[in-house]
Image: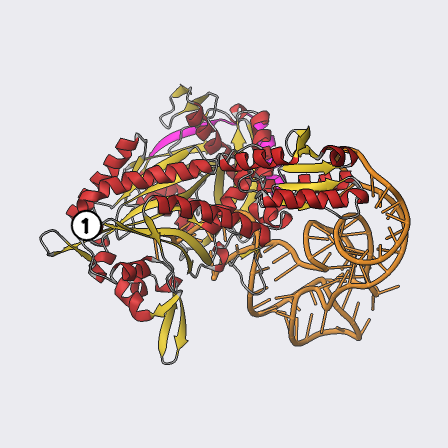
Amino acid sequence: MTAQGSLKAIRRDGSTYKVENGEEALEILRHSTSHLMALAVTELFPGVHLGIGPPTSEGFYYDFETPHRFTTEDLAQIERKMEELKKQNLRFVPSIISKAQAVELFRKKSERLKVELIEERDGQVLSCYQLGSLIDFCTGPHVVSTGDMGAFKLLSIAGSYWKGDEYREQLQRIYGTAFFTEEELDAYVARLEEARKRDHRRLGKELDLFSVQDAVAPGLIFWHPRGAKVRTLIEEYLREKLESRGYQFVYTPHIARNVLWRTSGHYEYFRDNMYTLPVEDEEYVLKPMNCPGHILVYQSAKRSYRELPVRIAEFGTVYRYEKSGTLHGMLRVRGFTQDDAHIFCRPDQVLDEVIHTLDLAEEILQSFGFDRFKVTLSVGDPAQPQDYAGQPEDWRRAETVLAEALQKKGWEYNRVEGEAAFYGPKIDIQLIDALGRSWQLSTFQFDFNLPARFKVTYVGSDSKEHPVVMVHRALLGSLERFMGVLIEHYGGAFPVWLAPVQAVVVPVSQRHHEYAAAVEAQLKAQAVRVEADLRNEKVGYKIREAQLQKVPFMLVVGDREVETQTVSVRNRLEGDQGNMLIMDFAQRTRELARSKSIKP
RNA sequence: GCUGGCGUAGCUCAACGGUAGAGCAACUGAUUUGUAAUCAGUAGGUUGGGGGUUCGAUUCCCUUCGCCAGCUCCA
């Protein structure tokens, strides 16, 4: 969403200027609204102390320190107060002050968190903005007057740690959002509502796709028959694609002696996330990753330079302990299946492998209806070389390869320092869904750690052993998370090729049941996923149910259809499509599935 | 894990500390239906678990498990 709009802003030196860039103007508007909220809160709840109150991509928040617990009733009251203050056309009054003055000022006001912030600042010249009775330590810029503000709404209350540090005090955060106009605010609220309706947890229940049995298995997914069907279709598609691209599928055990995980380093660095179990007098580990297993498969024989690259793939189910508060439907779980693969290759093959993988990721994500991506190249922090495994020159070479591959693909990307894994630089692809939200799924990562620890090599043409280059890649990430994203992207209305049920046969009355069953049998024989609805209900009832279940086609059969050996096709989007021969419908459906058409 | 909110029938939700209800779903019967809900009846609950206060607890308190909104974390 690109913001349109402009406003007049006031800098901390008191000069004013016109902000034409919509994004920038919106950010100033929201930042100013957060100050207005802070003013309202301090007036309504004397004794509240201030944390910070920045704008965010969706709105703004302000953190407060107070023994009072904010409630939703308080939000309404604060909102009313904000409206009242806004009407008073209060001006934002900036002032430049010295660090010493600032410390003095906020110490007097007992704003100890502000004092802490100020004392950390390097510069000696700081600034404040005064709005009504509220003086805030702030660089600005702000709108000139509260009268210039737009539409706003307070959204939620949450705890937050001071400076995001879980060992520091916990504050209360109030979230809100602001826009230039009421219409934009309404559209945003409508979008929140749409996202709520598409929530995969809700749709998962309504469409009977999966469940989480909270009482016995928090954070673990039970795939119901329909969800499992979708998953099977995804897996079959991927398997076929990968095998045709030279990947070899394996299965590796879910548990292994902890020595494997000591060798890999996970026991040392990933221990907090691992489940362990005693077996006789030893300890076994439930695998949190597939890499060591794939390395063992690779190392089961001496590998010649001639057979590289070796691409080992697995729909590998891993388990990781995640803190209870982080679990979220299918998107954040404790057990999940990665569409994982490890590529073992020679240094001269890496570039082709990266390009090959990016091509594959692009093709596969597009098949699922995602055509907008953001790409990130994450590299190490050059100031902290000790945090990373491998040699600096390995890192430089790897980055060059990744950047070259991206260039050859013609993709724009963000280079982010310090975001790499400790074991190697990586490319991440975030996809953007139907509601404009981004999800990080595909990843392509160099690994300088495991090959060294396991001494993974190949025999070169010189008949000597050489270290292998290992890359880890996942295209969908995990099937659980991908399924969750897919459900929300389609709002539960899967395209024909993924729909667990592609068509429902709806007989008009009981005397058409026999024909309906015959239609079902014929279509099944043609590989159409079809169910005949033979319940004692009226046509409208069954149509409604099939619509709500988001089945792509409903096939109504009565006297006319029996007579002509046809079905009356109803499309979930466009309604009644008229009659069609059974075989024609089968062929059309198969074609829609084969082409992975997004409609209907 | 932390802060706050929440946990009642398969689902969505009611019930001033005083006999736990409704709609949908399920089941039974009637109806034989032409493109988004046919009618009637029946059954369904240790109110997440455990403990406490009380004559009496879905309601108040403690504890535990889980969920939700965030925070933190997420190779």
Which quadrant: the C terminus of chain A?
A: top right
- Picture quadrant of residue A510: top right
In the visual, does A278 lie left or right of A149? left
Amino acid carrying mark 1 in the image: Arg
- Residue A436 picture location, percent across and down: 48, 34
In the visual, does A560 lie left or right of A342? right
Question: Is A481 contained in the magenta span?
Answer: no
Q: Which residues are magenta?
A: A73-97
- Residue B24 picture location, percent across and down: 77, 48
Q: Is residue A540 visible?
A: yes
In the visual, does A171 lie left or right of A128? right
User: What residue sits 54% from the left and 63% below the top?
Assistant: A217
Q: Give the vertical position of A329 relative to A62 (above or below).
A: below
User: What residue sits 62% from the left and 50% below the top?
Assistant: A208
Q: Nearer the viewer, residue A384 or A321?
A: A321
Q: Is residue A55 visible?
A: no
- Label 1: how many Cα within 10 Å (few below 14, some 14–19, many 20+): few
Please name the residue that numbered disc 1 is placed on: A306
